[in-house]
Amino acid sequence: MIKKISIILFVFFITCSAHAQLFPLHDSIPMRDGKKLAADVYIPSGSQQRPTILIQTPYNKNYYPFLGLPLQVGMNINSSQYNFVIADWRCFYGSTSACTSQVNRGRDGYDCVEWIAQQPWSNGLIGTWGPSALGIVQFQTAKEHPPHLTCCIPIVAGMRTTYLRYFPGGVYRTEYVQMLDLLGYGLSTILLAHPVHDIYWTIAENTTFYPDSIRVPMFMIGGWYDHATEELLESFEGIRTQSDPAVRAQHKLIMGPWTHNTASSAPDSVGALIYPQAMNVSDSLARKFADYYLLNALNGWNSRPVVDYFIMGENTWNSDTSWNTNNLSATNLYFHSNGTMDQAIPSAPSDSQTIVYDPHNPSPTVGGPTLLHTLNQGPYDQTTVVESQNDILTYTTDTLVQNVTLRGKPVAHLKVSSDKTDTDFSIRLTDVYPDGRSMLVLDGIRRMRFRNGYATADTSAMIPGTVYPLDMDLFANTSITFLAGHRIRVDITSSNYPRFDCNLNKDEPMYTSGDTLIANNTVYLDNSRASFISLMTTSFPTQVSIYRDAFDFTVFPNPSPEFVTCTWTIEKESTVKISLTDVTGKEILILEKRKQEPGNYQQKIDLSALSEGIYFLKLSVNGMTSVKKLVRIF
């Protein structure tokens, strides 16, 4: 199967690049144990010595003549100020013959760097570049301190190997490990032998995090729709505070609206959305970083912010001295059985909703931080497939009357029960557009046997019918503004497949074949057992903007080409204000009447001066607000 995927990709690259191809020199790099790694060397024309970019890959160096080279070089090697060396990892592709039972990729990286430094075309300055596994190996190489390593550009990668990378919420990442197996890592057998946090994971986590061993500047690149966001942010914070003091202040980070497969190239479209403001940003900044450290370019890199991050929704760049959410406040949005979500704690003494979860008919994965080549990555609409099924609970705010910016990692706090001894609860957070699209932002899942922790001693079966508190984070930090005119939504299911393994709903050994059970899973929504999501926000509408459809507020005709008429009812003397806003929340028209007496009212509004599009009419009565979407047509 691996060979089949390799052949398909190779043919694809040849087809797409039929008229453009690079022609490297084929070489081999001796390792300290006498083995050799296969490598391709790209040298621009001319006889001068240059700095070199090292790329260490498990994905076949033979693709690069058709893919092109990074750092804005592409196919034009003769315009490059760098040499490039691309080496296959030991045990992979051209370096298969170098395979041994014990592999230390950091030492192999050291040997590659120092071999390059001795070549006649090298000036002794070496940087590294690469995403994912190509990024992880840069940390491993830097840990070994090769004398001629100058700087590193790890992309969508962190250094630590954790239990939660493979079992987030205690649930096996099915599609992720499937793709890793297809790529040749063969991890599934050992992972499934350690489905709880045991000594294997303790050793892995303690030995793969070494920020104090980093002695060269790093430029780290991550994506909000990547599956390694948390590992990347942890590693960046680690090297900013624990690496060699001489380079601590030189590390920088950029986080964009990218997936695992798009962070290095930064196309204008990601998933089903378009981000032209982020197009080509990552590679151009990586080039600027490399030029500064390898070419001594006076390009202002040292004066750039420590952290650049993209705010999705409003689609703007922002900067900070670090990535943290210490200056933000938590906003709790409570779930109600009528499908709404707001800041009001439920008032009912007893309320709940139940979903039926059948492992043979799971809630499907649609987009998100996936890796398997058959799945979509990034933001995709959940309405037609996920939210149309009957195994889901959906909670949505009313239309936002002002922008709400979320930064950080949301956490859901649920009160739940089941009629089975084990099950899962899964959450998706979405941005609901005025046209009805429910675009995925983040997701999370938790296996109930792991509700108290992930070690064997922490696990316990559920008692059917017993209500349990369940705190569940949505796995990753993000940065997004929910625009005025949009809504915020939370989808609750008991599965998200194939992103995550399907629970068999039994307190028995996991990941084995056998019969499945159908579970009836309940979420509680009353004043003593409220369920809610906590969002770290820079601002959130106060009680003035409570989401309720009040005062019998109507707007007709809608859509309309010229005029609309608003009607509303006042039950007591009140201060009334009507405002018209665009989709950004900007007020276009304000009609205000003070101290209206009880009664029925109407107001005619002329739309002739407005462009075609979507607007919002906001009725405020003594601080209580109702909002209606208005569509102006020609």
Image: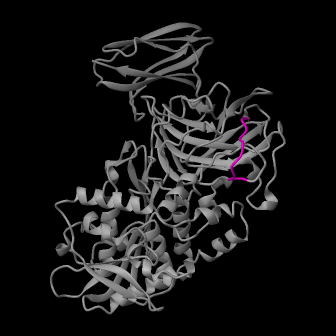
Q: Between residues 290 and 196, which one lies in front from this camera angle?
A: 196
Split into 4 quadrants, where in the image is the C terminus?
Answer: top left
Q: Between residues 198 and 353, which one lies in front from this camera angle?
A: 198
* Percent coordinates x, y for residue 442 in the rendering: 54, 47
Split into 4 quadrants, where in the image is the N terminus?
Answer: bottom left
| Left or right: 376 in relation to 331 | left
Please determine whether, in this image, residue 164 is positioned above or below residue 296: above
* Percent coordinates x, y for residue 80 in the rendering: 21, 74
Which residue is located at x 48 percent, y 91 percent?
33
Which of the colour schemes (rainbow, by chain, secondary structure, one colour) is used?
one colour
* Percent coordinates x, y for residue 549 in the rendering: 57, 20
| Left or right: 1 in relation to 237 | left
Residue 322, visible in the rendered structure: yes
Please determine whether, in this image, residue 23 is positioned above or below residue 319: below
Please determine whether, in this image, residue 455 is positioned above or below residue 388: below
Q: Between residues 338 and 82, which one lies in front from this camera angle?
A: 82
Which residue is located at x 26 percent, y 68 percent?
65
Bounds of the magenta segment: 510-519
Q: Between residues 267 and 19, which one lies in front from this camera angle?
A: 19
| Left or right: 169 in relation to 185 | right
Residue 70, visible in the rendered structure: no
Q: Quadrant of residue 570?
A: top right
Which residue is located at x 71 percent, y 53 percent?
510
Q: Magenta span: helix, strand or loop, mainly? A: loop
